[in-house]
Amino acid sequence: MKKHYSIDIKIQAVLKAARPGVLAQDVADEIGIHTFSLYRWKKELRDAGLLNKMPKKIGEQTDLKLRDQLERVQKENRQLKMENAVLKKLQELGDAKRKKTSK
């Protein structure tokens, strides 16, 4: 007879399998299911939007990706600040020139 598991148990199992150093096989064995079922749960939960694009493994890879993303965003922010400063300076020069010509 096929055993049915609650959404909570499925989510907990999928999240546990995503931890660094934890094997999906160990989690599946602990619950008493086949590893394929655990992967199917993960897909079903992702498709239903309950896992919000969970990474394959939570941990170092995610940290590295976040650091890379942070560096890119900081670099873009510096570039935009410089562009903004140049535009403000051009606007000031234009305003000063208009004042001179209007007098």
Image (cartoon, rainbow, N blue to C red):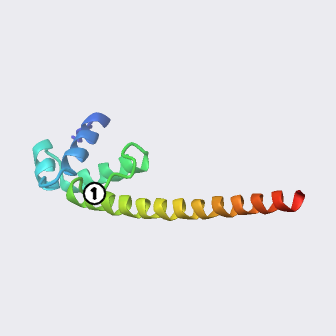
> Local crowd at mark 1 within 10 Å, few (<14), some, or many (≥20)?
few
Query: Does residue 55 appear to the left or right of 17 in the view shown?
Result: right
Q: Which residue is farthest front?
A: 103
Q: Judge left or right: residue 18 versus residue 43.
A: left
The residue under label 1 is which amino acid type? Answer: Thr
Quarter of the picture containing the C terminus is bottom right
Residue shown at 58%/60% (left/top)?
85
| Image: 3 above or below 67 | above
Instruction: Say whether residue 6 is visible.
Output: no
Q: Position of residue 9 (x, y in %)?
A: 24, 36
Relative depth, front residue between 33 and 43: 43
Q: What secondary structure is marked by label 1?
A: helix
Residue at screen point 60% across, 64% down:
86
**For the image shown, how many numbered marks are present on the structure?**
1
The one of 101 and 50 positioned closer to us in this rendering = 101
* Location of mark 1 (residue): 62
The residue lying toward the viewer, choosing from 57 and 66, is 66
Asked which quadrant contains residue 83, the reply is bottom right
- In the image, residue 6 sits, relative to residue 61, either above or below, namely above
Quadrant (top left, top right, bottom left, bottom right) of the N terminus:
top left
- Locate residue 50: give its quadrant: top left
Q: Locate residue 5, reporting x and y percent.
A: 26, 37
Whether residue 21 appears in this view of the structure is: yes
Q: Position of residue 24 (x, y in %)?
A: 17, 54
Query: Would you say 52 lies left or right of 11 here?
Result: right
Q: How far from the left and from the top, in percent, is residue 60?
A: 20, 58
Query: In the visual, does 3 lie left or right of 99?
Result: left
